[in-house]
């Protein structure tokens, strides 16, 4: 009995529920064959969310459409045989126009989810028609129009296809521009949508477009891929700079990938480049996140995947269409409480207007004519992807103006997401017309042409002047002012040249032209009355000097300093001889003076010699020559004023280069000369840096030097001057072995000269000793520069006052009250000696007279 009562109750409830039959006109398109499943999913959601009254239920009846007007026939069948009170579909414009007219006659609402055709906008004919399509041509045109006004673009160009452009947003945009003064159309270019890139270029239409517009709206089809060839043609025509803006309305997303992402298309990178920085406007409902969400829901509810991206978009719109009907049905039922309210199509349609809800395609805004006003997003194609620059939010307009005038019922409110994204210099939107016009006719370029011509002329003048200057400089370089004619040089016989004088230094007689080893290693000559020292070599072939050596030799000729010997010149390619000529210095090598035990040199002489050497190197390192190349005590000469002059700087490097290439060879007059020359060279090489010795031992020739190598040699020279000792004098090994040990100091252990034990007569400041040791560091970069060495030398080595009548007191530092060269100091010393001698004579004479008087008194 209990079960019978329950069954009776259920029967009564089922009898009481009102069934609403939904007429579903399914297009004959297998891609969207699952539309009925979407309607059932939405109907279930309406019940689950308690949107539908509990006594109302929905039944979906699906029949074919879009197949030889089968939809019209089936719509009538659904109305008369099944009492369908709402229609969804069909998906073709020719059938929906007819069915919408019939729906008005039947007082049945019809909701389009695929088409937003402008022909359906007349509500006097289609009074029960509503649409929830993701986009429509007219709304896309309105969104594009809003974006144009946002950027203050008043003149634009339009590119459309030659056929079937009535269903595109371009058609509606033309109408909007025609009825508005905000935007005007400068040019309309029609392009065959199937034309190749070359055909578009050859047509000449791009040149017309170039001279007519800079802001160009391009729509050759529903999808973005429809304008591939046009954009490629624009790229090839060099119309993709910062002046141009291409706006691409994207009405329908047929596929979910970009044109350049198609694997089968060649030159994808060119397509990507062609679309770069283009502006794309599309409906917000096409957002990838919304599509993914619905695809997941559809797969979960039905158990199978949608056939394509396009199918998902269709299903999303269809879901929102039924959801809109459910909301309107609920509102109508709440007002009337009538279970048969679904038969009142006009009331249901009225409740569909002026409402907003969140659907599967995002925010759904329905205006006063039951037409969806989509929100749009403006993208910029950047590096192959879309970036949002402006959001065009759909909103309902002023109700009063809308009801009275039928204007401003809806609008798009722009929200700028990204600023300064344009290619212009300041990032601002480009102008719709360049300042000089599209063809440059609005500007007078005369002054610019003259200015440009003047600039070019000035530039050419500078270039020609510089070229002539360099040519003149090169010509002067090849003039070789340092070249001396061989016939003007007269070699002297040292045996008959007796022009020497002598001078006394601390009791020693020193010849002005001592027969020193340095002098014996060089010949003497006279050229134009100037006495010269000559290094003489035999030429094996004609010699040429490279440009860098010519520059160095020119600089050597111009170089003058009191502590540098004067380079006189070179004789070459004459009489098979190469002569290196330097000004003759009377007293010869500093080494011969320093190591002459018969010469008594006080500390003032040694200090003066050391300072002269440092000053000479300081000048060389600051000059274009940059380094000496073979600094040693033997290349330090002493003139008649006891001033040290450095000689043979850089010429030894040039000679070594010629010897290396067998262009010259040394001349030996006697058999013993070769041995003497080897001894002299060995003494010089011992004073060279390890990095120089390594190359010398390897190649047998002197390499190019460096400032760091000069500093090493300077330490050796200072050591010999201050201590009057030869380097490594304490070692009892051959010179050859010593050179090998010095060159391979890393492997065989670093050896350096030893300093003598300090005593009261010859000790030096520790800072000076440390500086000399620093000059001998193995790593060249760690050695002090010449500026540092000069500072230490000047601070620690100073000359002493000389007592003409007494002994010299040697202490750590020495001072001299006079100034000038060593000769000046000697002259001042002699003057003081003369004055003091007169005083002593007078004093002694007075004593003698007094003694004489005492003797006279004793005698008498």
Image (cartoon, grey):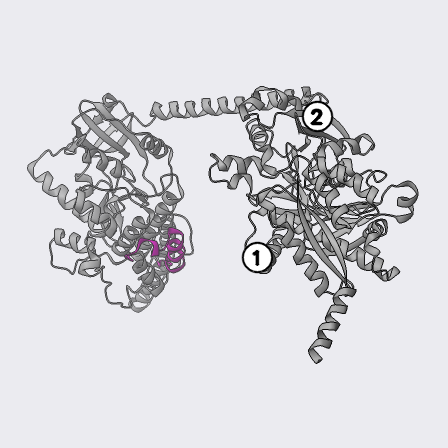
Q: Nearer the viewer, residue 119 or 180?
A: 119
- Magenta span contains residue 794: yes
Q: Position of residue 752 (x, y in %)?
A: 23, 59
745 left or right of 767?
left
Q: Nearer the viewer, residue 334 or 191?
A: 334
345 left or right of 486?
right
Q: Mark 1, mark 2: which one is toward the viewer? A: 1
What segment is highlighted magenta in the picture? 776-803
Which residue is disc 1 drawn over? 299
Q: Nearer the viewer, residue 339 or 412?
A: 339
Task: Choose top left, top right, bottom left or bottom right for residue 142.
Answer: top right
Q: Is residue 374 visible?
A: no
Q: Residues within 10 Å of mark 2 (few under 14, many from 20)?
A: some
Q: Residue at x 92, y 47 (%)?
A: 400
Q: Secondary structure at mark 2?
A: strand
Q: Position of residue 197 (x, y in %)?
A: 54, 26
- Residue lying furthest front: 1
Q: Residues within 10 Å of mark 1 (few under 14, many from 20)?
A: few
- Magenta span contains residue 723: no
Task: Tell me the distance, in whole angstroms, between the alpha carbons under discs 1 and 2.
Answer: 46 Å
Which residue is disc 2 drawn over? 188
Examine the rendered structure and indicate whether residue 722 appears above or below residue 615.
below
Closer to the N terminus: mark 1 or mark 2? 2
Examine the rendered structure and indicate whether residue 110 appears above or below residue 442.
below
Examine the rendered structure and indicate whether residue 618 appears above or below residue 423.
below
Q: Quadrant of the N terminus?
A: bottom right
């Amino acid at each position: 009995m209990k079960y019978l009562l329950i069954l009776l109750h259920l029967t009564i409830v089922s009898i009481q529920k009102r069934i609403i039959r939904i007429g579903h006109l399914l297009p004959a398109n297998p891609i969207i064959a699952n539309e009925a499943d979407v309607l059932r999913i939405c109907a279930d959601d309406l019940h689950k969310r308690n949107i539908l009254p509990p006594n109302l239920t929905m039944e979906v009846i699906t029949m074919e459409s879009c197949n030889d007007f089968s939809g019209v026939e089936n719509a009538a069948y659904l109305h008369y045989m099944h009492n369908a009170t709402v229609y969804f579909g069909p998906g073709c414009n020719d059938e929906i126009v007819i069915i919408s007219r019939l729906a008005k006659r039947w007082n049945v609402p019809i909701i389009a989810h695929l088409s937003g055709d402008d022909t359906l906008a007349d509500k006097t004919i289609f009074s029960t028609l509503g649409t929830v399509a993701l986009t429509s041509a007219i709304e896309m045109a309105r969104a594009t129009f809003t974006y144009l006004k946002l950027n203050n673009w008043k003149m634009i160009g339009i590119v459309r296809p030659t056929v079937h452009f009535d269903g595109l947003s371009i058609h509606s945009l033309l109408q909007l521009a025609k009825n508005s003064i905000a935007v005007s159309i400068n040019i309309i270019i029609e392009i065959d949508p199937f034309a190749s890139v070359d055909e578009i270029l050859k047509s000449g239409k791009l040149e017309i477009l170039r001279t007519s517009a800079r802001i160009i709206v391009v729509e050759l089809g529903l999808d973005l891929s429809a304008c591939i060839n046009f954009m490629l043609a624009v790229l090839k025509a060099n119309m993709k700079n910062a002046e141009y803006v291409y706006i691409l309305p994207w009405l329908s997303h047929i596929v979910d990938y970009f044109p350049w992402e198609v694997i089968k298309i060649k030159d994808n990178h060119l397509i990507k480049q062609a679309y770069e920085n283009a502006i794309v406007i599309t409906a917000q409902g096409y957002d990838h996140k919304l599509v993914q969400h619905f695809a997941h829901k559809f797969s979960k509810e039905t158990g199978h995947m949608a056939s394509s991206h396009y199918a998902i978009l269709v299903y999303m719109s269809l879901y929102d269409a039924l959801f809109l009907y459910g909301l309107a049905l609920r509102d109508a039922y709440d007002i009337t409480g009538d279970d048969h309210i679904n038969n009142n199509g006009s009331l249901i349609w009225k409740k569909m207007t002026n409402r907003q809800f969140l659907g599967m395609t995002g925010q759904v805004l329905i205006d006063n004519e039951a037409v969806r006003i989509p929100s749009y997003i403006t993208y910029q194609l950047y590096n192959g992807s879309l970036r949002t620059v402006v959001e065009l939010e759909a909103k309902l307009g002023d109700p009063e103006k809308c009801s009275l005038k039928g204007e401003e019922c809806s609008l798009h409110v722009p929200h700028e997401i990204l600023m300064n994204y344009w290619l212009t210099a300041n990032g601002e939107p480009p102008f719709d017309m360049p300042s000089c016009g599209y063809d440059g006719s609005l500007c007078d370029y005369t002054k610019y042409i003259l200015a440009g011509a003047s600039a070019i002329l000035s530039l050419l003048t500078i270039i020609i002047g510089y070229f002539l200057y360099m040519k003149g400089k090169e010509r002067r370089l090849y003039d070789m002012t340092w070249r001396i004619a061989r016939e003007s040089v007269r070699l002297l016989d040292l045996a008959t040249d007796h022009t020497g004088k002598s001078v006394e230094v601390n009791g020693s007689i020193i010849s002005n032209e001592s027969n020193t080893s340095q002098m014996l290693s060089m010949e003497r000559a006279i050229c134009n009355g100037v006495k010269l020292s000559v290094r003489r070599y035999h030429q094996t072939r004609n010699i040429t000097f490279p440009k860098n050596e010519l520059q160095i030799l020119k600089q050597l000729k111009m170089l003058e300093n009191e502590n540098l010997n004067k380079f006189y010149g070179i004789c070459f390619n004459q009489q098979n001889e190469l002569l290196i000529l330097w000004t003759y210095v009377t007293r010869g090598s500093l080494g011969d003076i320093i190591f002459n035990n018969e010469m008594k040199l006080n500390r003032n002489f040694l200090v003066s010699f050391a300072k002269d050497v440092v000053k000479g190197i300081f000048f060389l390192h600051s000059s274009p020559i940059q380094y000496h190349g073979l600094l040693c005590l033997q290349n330090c000469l002493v003139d008649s004023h006891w001033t040290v002059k450095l000689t043979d700087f850089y010429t030894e490097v040039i000679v070594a280069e010629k010897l290396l290439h067998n262009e010259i060879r040394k001349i030996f007059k006697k058999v013993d000369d070769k041995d003497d020359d080897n001894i002299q060279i060995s003494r010089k090489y011992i004073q060279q840096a390890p990095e120089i010795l390594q190359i010398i031992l390897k190649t047998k020739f002197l390499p190019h030097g460096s400032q760091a190598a000069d500093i090493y040699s300077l330490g050796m020279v200072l050591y010999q001057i201050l201590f009057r000792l030869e380097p490594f004098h304490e070692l009892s090994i051959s010179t050859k072995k010593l050179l090998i040990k010095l060159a391979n100091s890393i492997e065989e252990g670093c050896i350096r000269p030893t300093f003598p034990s300090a005593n009261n007569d010859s000790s030096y400041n520790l800072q000076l000793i440390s500086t000399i040791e620093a000059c001998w560091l193995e790593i060249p970069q760690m050695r002090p520069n010449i500026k540092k060495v000069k500072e230490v030398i000047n601070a620690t080595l100073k000359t002493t006052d000389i007592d003409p009548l007494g002994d010299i007191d040697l202490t750590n530092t020495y001072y001299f009250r006079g100034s000038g060269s060593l000769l000046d100091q000697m002259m001042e010393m002699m003057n003081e000696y003369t004055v003091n001698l007169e005083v002593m004579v007078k004093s002694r004479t007075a004593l003698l007279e007094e003694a004489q008087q005492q003797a006279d008194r004793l005698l008498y």
